[in-house]
Amino acid sequence: SQQGEEDPQALSIQEGENATMNCSYKTSINNLQWYRQNSGRGLVHLILIRSNEREKHSGRLRVTLDTSKKSSSLLITASRAADTASYFCATDAFGSQGNLIFGKGTKLSVKP
Amino acid sequence: DAGVTQSPTHLIKTRGQHVTLRCSPISGHKSVSWYQQVLGQGPQFIFQYYEKEERGRGNFPDRFSARQFPNYSSELNVNALLLGDSALYLCASSLVLVQGLNYGYTFGSGTRLTVV
């Protein structure tokens, strides 16, 4: 079963605009991770935020985590055509051995 | 340094057949996990191995099995293939396996399995 639910399922924006994707989850977590997947190939790890962190930055990426609402958001600023991909949130649930539970993903399309 | 390598990249099998998928983790990584990703869905956890021992198993039937070798590479075996087993199978490795894994996994490019 899937833990997370990303919102929206699909997002289409113009280059230079910001893209925001949201993720909700159900159980207590150790951390939450965001991954990118191009054209159904391997997943690329983008950023990890621990349960005691509220915000984290990496380049053009900003991730927030609200454990009281069991939700996270991924913001990509100044998007580029190369950012076109599917984005997944994955939770490392509390008590697990590190196996990840993924959401269904947000398909982002950035038009030149 | 080579990343996580998976073989083969594509595979077509007939219902009822058996398949073996292979994964080589990043050098020095001792933990390997397997995920199944059906088209349009997020990856689902199948198995996790650390130091050659099974440390986690997802909600998959007994037709699915795996093992990890002394060099930390891993195999995923699926018996009596069904049409519904058609998916992208992803392998991921990490250096260690600790509760609250404070770093991300490195994924391979996957094996695309089609069952006809």
Image (cartoon, coloured by chain):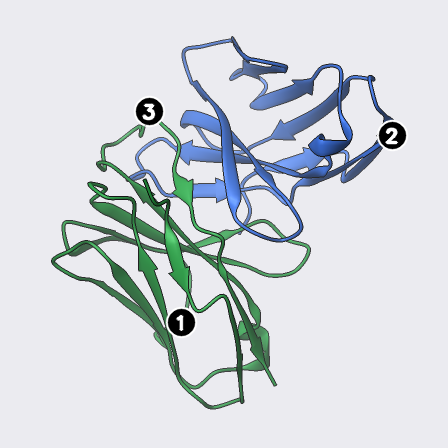
The kind of residue tagged 2 is Pro
Q: Residue at x 58, y 75 (%)?
A: B84
Q: Residue A11: horizontal and vertical position, in percent? A: 81, 34
Foreground residue among B68 and A23: B68
**What chain is colored green?**
B
Residue A107 drawn above or below residue A17: below
Mark 3 lies on a secondary structure that is loop
The span from disc 1 to disc 2 (Cα, nearest Å) is 45 Å
The kind of residue tagged 1 is Pro
* Of labels 1 and 3, the one closer to you: 3
The span from disc 1 to disc 3 (Cα, nearest Å) is 30 Å
The span from disc 2 to disc 3 (Cα, nearest Å) is 36 Å
Quarter of the image for residue A22 reads top right
**What chain is colored blue?**
A
Mark 1 lies on a secondary structure that is loop
Farthest front residue? B1
Label 2 sits on residue = A112
Task: Kindly indicate whether the residue at mark 2 contacts the one at mark 1 (C-beta within 8 angstroms).
Answer: no
The kind of residue tagged 3 is Asn
Q: Residue at x 36, y 43 (%)?
A: A99
Label 3 sits on residue = B102
Q: Chain of mark 2?
A: A
Foreground residue among A50 and A108: A108
